[in-house]
Image: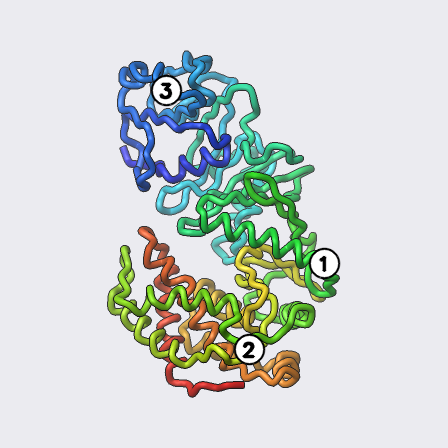
Amino acid sequence: MEKQILLSDLLILKKIFFCKNINLVILDPELRLNIDTDKSIMIYLSRAELEEDITGWPHQNVLVDFSVWDLSKYKNHDKIVSIIGFNKSLDKSDTELYYVNNPDKSLRWIFPAENSDPIFLSLYNSDSLKATIFKKLIRGSYALGIKKWCASGSIFMYRKEQSVAPFALQGLSFEEWAIFTGTVGENRKAIIALSENGACTHFMKVPITMSAQKLVGAEYFHLKCMGDYNFEYINIPKVSRNENGIVLSNVRPNAFEKSAIIKDVHINAILELYGKTISRKQLREISAWKTIKKGLPILTENPTAINDIPKEKLQLISEHISNLSHTFESNDNYVVAFAHGDFTPWNMYFTVSRLYLYDWELSVPDMPVLFDLFHFNFQNGILVERLKYEEIKKGVERCMNEEAVQLFLKAHKINWQKYYRFYVVYIICYYLPKYMGQIRLHQQVHWLLDVWEAAARDMSKIPVLKA
């Protein structure tokens, strides 16, 4: 049988659904488990092996069952607190959860079969034609009562003494929930959507990795700081936290637009943010420069990837970054301000007069200005419109020539190309070392690398500007 379930996905379910001192035990006679992590785990291939060992287990175990056998007798076993079945339900008291897979068969979304609304679509922000059709089909299936059509499969969960709702949600108010298991990589986090009265009201971020814990902690801190400002053009989430992660209000307005083009409201919001947080720093004082210095040795001293990043591509980027690194001077002055850090169409909604921004985990309080405007053009151009670097650069230039941006540049005596150079070097030094150490890469990473290489090559040709 095809291996359909990743061990890494089961470990994420364990983290979300159960407290920290719970152990995971797997019964897998049909070899359905894909062991994609070196995490030590107890796996049994036969019922006899399991029954022989069970008395010696530590307390508080979750049994993941890939067999077709009747394991209902284990419901009352003192060593088992929950049974998760991928083939069948033990009895009618079990809770059925639907899951939807990614193209690579990893788990993407998980939600109760009894949900009355497709709340998991709140975790899907793409607005492409394909995505729009998909959303309409899902909503149609719920309206027609055939919602199982949208699922890749079912999980049946039995749990002692408490509801099947994720442990991470204890103490929160909600009626329905759905889980996004997160994007594979160093910064992986799960996101749980919560709804009341048919509307998604909050999201909970549960960090999976140590790196994600730092990012989620930074998002909490920065949103708390930003809450002190009275913005005219920006709406940000309200935030709270517990031991499992952070809880964010849903900023989505009732009526809104999304756009792949930077409009006046985007520029007004960025300039308002700058107006409240702007300062000047020498390069050596800027936190983003420390990130660049951390990435430079990895990229310039015999760079090696453990995946399918072409050696030739890596070498070209290495050479460009090495050359560019010598163009920076530690005592050079930069205008800095608060940056969202991932200012992209899929992290915002807008109306004519207001921008609703979420996902602040990559925010930086002292980033050289214009970063977010550069990033919008790059990420949208690469990942949505699939543009070549030359077209993306034209978009950057159009943005820099907007009247409000020009007034800002003149007021602060900024030459935007100097800040553009910083953006290109930073984005490569931050992300590429992470991608080099990641076993599985999405196709989009190769799209990014192609444009980054062209951008770094272009920057190497432009004279260094001090303003």
Q: Amino acid at mark 1?
A: Asp
Q: Residue 57: which disc? A: 3
Residue wearing tag 2: 334
Q: Residue 228: which disc? A: 1
Q: Is residue 339 above or below residue 463?
A: above
How crowded is the residue under tag 1: few (<14 C-alpha within 10 Å), some, or many (20+)? Answer: few
Q: Closest to the observer: 293 or 147?
A: 293
Q: Earlier in the sequence, mark 1 or mark 2?
A: 1
Marks 1/2: CA–CA distance: 25 Å
Q: Secondary structure at mark 1?
A: loop
Circles 2 and 3 in contact, beta carbons < 8 Å: no
Which of the 4 quarters of the picture holds residue 448? bottom left
Q: Amino acid at mark 3?
A: Trp
Residue 301 visible at all = yes
Residue 139 visible at all = no
Q: Residue 299: which disc? A: none
Q: Secondary structure at mark 2?
A: strand
Q: Earlier in the sequence, mark 2 or mark 3?
A: 3
Q: How many marks?
A: 3
Q: Residue at x 38, y 40 (%)?
A: 8
Q: Looking at the figure, which quarter contains the C terminus?
A: bottom right
Percent x, y of residue 326: 38, 79
Q: Closest to the observer: 182 or 415?
A: 415
Marks 2/3: CA–CA distance: 59 Å
